[in-house]
Image (tube, helix red, strand yellow):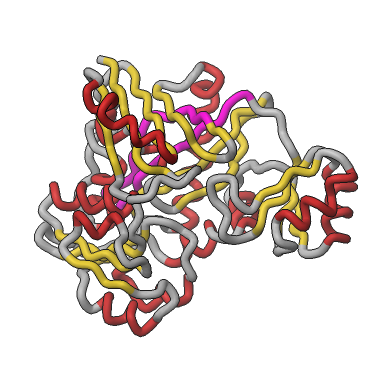
Amino acid sequence: MSKVEVVAPGSIIGIVGGGQLGRMLAVAAARLGYKCHIFDPHEHPCAADVAEAFTRGAFDDRAALERFAGQVDVATYEFENLPAEPLTALGPKLRPGVRSLAVAQDRAEEKSFIESTGGRVAPWRSVASLGEVQAAVGELKLPLVLKTRRYGYDGKGQAWIRTWQDVAAAWDAIGREPAIAEAGIEFTAEFSVLLARAPGEAGCVFWDVPENVHEDGILRRSIVPASPAVLGQAEPAQAMALHIAEALDHIGVLTVEFFATPSGPLVNEIAPRVHNSGHWTIEGAVTSQFEQHVRAICGLPLGSSDRTGASVTMDNLIGDEASRWPELGAEPGARLHLYGKGEARPGRKMGHVTRVVH
């Protein structure tokens, strides 16, 4: 495992990306005495509201990233849809490294990498033309889903093929971009494994496995503890996730999304970062995923991941659901988080609410 020097409280953490994950990382960092510097191309990213400094720059602007590197003591990223090569300008200050990013942002490379670590995934093929999509249908059978290799999240860049008549329309729907074709599978539940891996001898910790409920490709709810169908597959799933983290030499929080199937857990995808399905840990665990990520990238001892209550539920507030803030703010036991994002567009994550039962 990589060794890094301790980055002491009072130092500056650079965060590439200024969305809600960066915002919550900055809040957690401040509690530990760190200052954060946000790098993002938008004029008013919500993470900048709670940070010491903000640089507006394009994610592929290597010169700007080099200047940014000179202003921070350690750096991390809050999402994976970033060009990886320019981030090499951050050098060894970047944790986790570019390798984790590069694997996670290309679905074909991701699938191959997961399989190389012994992880199980649904049957899949790379496709780059309508003819290859047709061949994949013949090999994988129906139904199957097309997923663009890059820049897909929250159900974007995906199209289902349920009959032969759907093939051309699905290929058009994803913009005829290089993609993977993935066999549709039967599953009883979706869940995620969240782990934090620190350098040196600090080791690795897992949180309880949350069961996740999605609608239209967007996470709606995470529940801890998960159902028996999920809990029965948690141990082998955690082992798969750990093998992935070790193969990447990943430092920080890593999230691995799974399907619970009759034949055991199947990896859906990986996210080399803090994750929506881990938001419950802010109130529901002794050490949140955000604080744990800060601890890991700064070389601090990892905290306890124990649950703080008997059960925890996290619900996303999507679009105009955030307008319910007066009601949710008045609800006993509800912990409301609003991201300060401004316009509440359909499908946009505006906040979340967590309920811990003791």
Q: Position of residue 66 (x, y in %)?
A: 31, 81
Question: Over which residues does the magenta segment extend?
Answer: 188-213
Q: How far across and down, in percent of the image, does residue 69 sit?
A: 27, 76
| Identity of the residue drawn at 36% across and 61% down | 17
Q: Is residue 188 above or below residue 88?
A: above
Determine if residue 22 is in view: yes
List the single residue furthest toward the bottom.
63
**What number of labels is visible?**
0
Q: Residue at x 59, y 45 (%)?
A: 155
In the image, residue 45 above or below residue 225: below
Residue 12 drawn above or below residue 291: below
- Residue 62 x, y percent position in the rendering: 39, 81
Q: Position of residue 113 (x, y in %)?
A: 60, 56
- Residue 212 forms part of the magenta stretch: yes
Q: Quadrant of residue 126?
A: bottom right
Q: Nearer the viewer, residue 167 or 356?
A: 167
